Amino acid sequence: MPLQRLKSMLNPRAIVVVGGSDRPGTVGRVVLRNLLAEGFTGTIHAINPKPVAMDGVHWAADLSELPSDVDLAIVATPAATVPGVIADLGARGVQVAIVLSGGVTAKSGYRAAMLEAARPSGLRIVGPNGLGVLAPHAQLNASFARGGALPGRLAFISQSGALVSSALSWASERGLGFSGVASVGDMADVGMADLIDLFAADSHTDAILLYVEGVTDAAAFLSAARAAARIKPVIAIKAGRDPAARAAAQSHTGAMAGDYDVYACAFERAGVVLVDTLEDLFDAASLLCVMRAQAGDRLAIVTNGGGAGVLAVDGLAAIGVHAAEWRPDTQARLEAILPADWSHRDPVDILGDADAERYRKALEIVLDAPEADAVLVIHCATAMCSPDEIAETVAKVVADRRARGAVKPVIGCWMGVRDRAVANAAFAAARLPMFDTPSAAVRGFGHLLAAARARSALLAAPSPRPDLRADPAAARAIFALARAEGRTRLNEVEAKAVLSAYGVPVAPTLMARTIDEVDDACSGLSPPYALKIISPDVIHKSDIGGVVLNLPTIGAAISAARTLRDRFHALLPNARLSGFAVESMAPAGGHELIVGLARDPVFGPVILFGAGGTAVEVLADKALGLPPLTDDLARRMIAKTRISRLLAGYRDHPATDLTAIALVLDAISAMAVDLPDILELDINPLRADASGVLALDARIVITPAQALDSPLVIAPPPSGWDVTLTTQGGLTAHVRPVWPEDQSALSEFFAALTPEDLRHRFLTSLKTVDEERLSLIAQVDFRRAISFVALDPETGAMLATALLAGGPQADRAEVAISVRSDLKGMGLGWSMLQHVLAYAKAVGVRVVESIEAADNDGALRLENEMGFTVRAAADDFSLRVAERILD
């Protein structure tokens, strides 16, 4: 129901403006005029104690006179009146209220009163303190924006009302239209996640655009964005690029993980394309609505202007794109059709006198070339040829190729053409993007690459690492000991012990509480030694000269301990010295890296990787990731850093063991999942070379009390739902949540089903299950769905699958089960459904339903026996809806 209520906002039957007025200068008058100007075809009511005389508006003095068919309200009354207005609107059956009023704040108390007033009826509230909502396809402008919006297929959700007005004006000048525009205001009730879900399900919307100042419910936002990005592009601008100061951070990671960088990391994980400017926002949307995301980064350029081609090439490096390099056969084909003075490389300069036929021949060759992933066609206006004819020719070439199954992206840039109407129309008819400048066109191609990366991130659902050693009990015992001593920062020896409990290789380190104990500590280690102070009052030991390296003998270590002690007390007379960390020196060489974990106030734990050492913050070479990580995500983090080029090996330096580094990142991810007590963690430096990794220094800060709730915003695979089931027919199966790695096994499983069983599972005639459907089963967002697989305990063969999908409404979920065709009748479907129902109840699902083909007698009989009620689907009598309420 929550999402169903919001749908009425985009296509209401009737509207009431509470505070509607005909008095100039009032918000209520602007809203009424906008509704009338847009031509809304439903009934418009105005509620005001004073008469409202406007043609097309039904005035009433009080809400008690409002008819029962009104489903959308716009509230523009003083803050103190808003809670009472909301209560009356809910009682009248209104579904959504857009509250424009300011002053409805937590401090005033009106916000809480407003939400309490809406609770009995379930009325949804957009705002307060917003600009309003527009739905051009419904001829609706329920806002006080200056002017309306053209109808189109872009949805725009903004946390700034002022930016909405500017964006509408900017888009109108460029002929861009919208399916919906929503100013979210203060998000007391309806948040960005709700609106993302709304537009994801909206048939009028091809892409969702976001202007984000700050996210409130990060888990809901990322879950909604991830679900939407699977079916349509989600593109965002994040305001505030400057990282927030983190003066209180006790680790390098905490200081380096800037707010904007964390947002960028989170958006990428959710499949959101992040852009820098308003122009980029709409360019990316216009392009991604007509083109598939592009993974290849080799761009071919066909141009009649050498300078324009050079400008395009100049922009390639900024987005990580390469010009195409022609193979001999491609080069020969181009030589055969082009004048002798052509450029003989990419960009393909076909010269200023090029006509439509020369463009056609060059474009066809470049489209055939496997060494080019996409093509940019540039035309600079000259008196020698018709830009319209060239545009129509390019569009026809691309249309012909698409008809034969070719999907290589083609982007246009027409420069210096005064009247581009015909060219624009030709490109629009062929669903090709057109840009004004080479730099804008290259950035457009960058958006395709960003969308491909974003889509790839969607297919990185978290999965367990069976090869990862983890002992959370040992780590918690160390935390408990530190808390018993009144500490939240572990000493180096303790921190390394926690890392060791998760399989991270650490330099052997012993604690010497006094100078006398340094002798015993060194005796248990091999020289040369490293000596470091341990103090709860010192964060970075090297800042006060608290580290001495390469001590050749025990005597040298004891002498160094005395020097460190004296220096410490001289510099910090009021600080506490707990002792010394004594360790064997690691072999020289290798790369110094940093791996860390910090707690972001919005997105929770954030993992950092980059170049380490004492200059870590100066180098600022970093990549961020949100846990839980997959091994693939860990490797992507490594690849994003500048130091990754050194890790790959160069000259006589062998490649570093990237698998060992990825395992450390995986271990830190597992710690973020298992140990919500950790606030900050640094491994700096992590020494890495061809033989592996070694943590030379570590620090960990924990919560003052044991943390019970996980701060993760991306749900990890649920624990405790691995079971071994024995069915009534005597079949034994191991059942567990799906892993992304199961996708190929799922493909084989569905390929072995009979055509009838396959039709019953997907409710359509399929010969094979495509990768998109498989990814929806294997790559799940555990906040919205779960897949279980049943495996043969001995062979590991897949016996059955079950998907429980809840969407944004957690109280209702849909189940779909498939059993291997040769195992039917052995009770496996019954056992799987029981397991799924138990899980659904545990996570708060109230109603489970299943959509079945009317002729699927076995499934309907099973569901009937398990307490489901069955009815014919309202919109398709070939389907049945089986529903069970969980008590």
Image (spheres, rainbow, N blue to C red):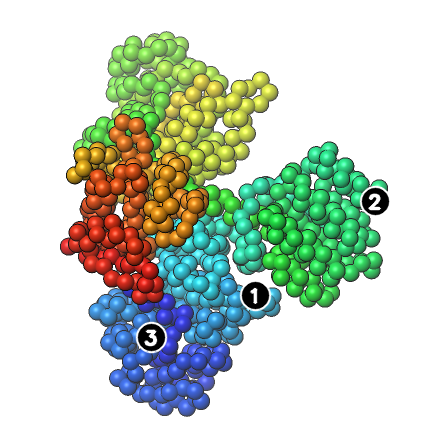
**Along the line of sight, the residue nearer the viewer: 508 or 183:** 183
Residue 5 placement (x, y as % from top left): 32, 67
> Which element type, helix, strand or loop, lies under badge 3?
loop
**What residue appears at the point 79 percent right and 54 percent down from the top-left corner?**
355
**Corner quadrant of residue 64:** bottom left
- The mark found on residue 783 in the picture is none
Dot 2 corresponds to which residue? 339
- Packing grade of label 3 (10 A; few <14, some 14-19, many >=20) is many
Q: Is residue 646 left or right of residue 253?
A: right
* Upstream in sequence: badge 2 or badge 3: 3
Nearer the observer, 367 or 422: 367
Q: Quadrant of the N terminus?
A: bottom left
Amino acid under disc 2:
Pro
Give the CA separation, mark 2 to mark 3: 67 Å
Circle 1 Cα neighbour tier, 10 Å, few/some/many (<14 / 14–19 / ≥20): some
Tell which of 592 and 828 is nearer to you.
828
Q: Position of residue 863 (x, y in %)?
A: 21, 52
Q: What is the crowding at mark 2: few (fewer than 14 residues within 10 Å), some, or many (at least 20)?
A: some
Q: Which residue is mark 3?
A: 71
Q: Amino acid at mark 3?
A: Asp
On screen, residue 1 above or below 631: below
Q: With respect to residue 207, does 92 lie above or below?
A: below
Badge number at residue 176: 1
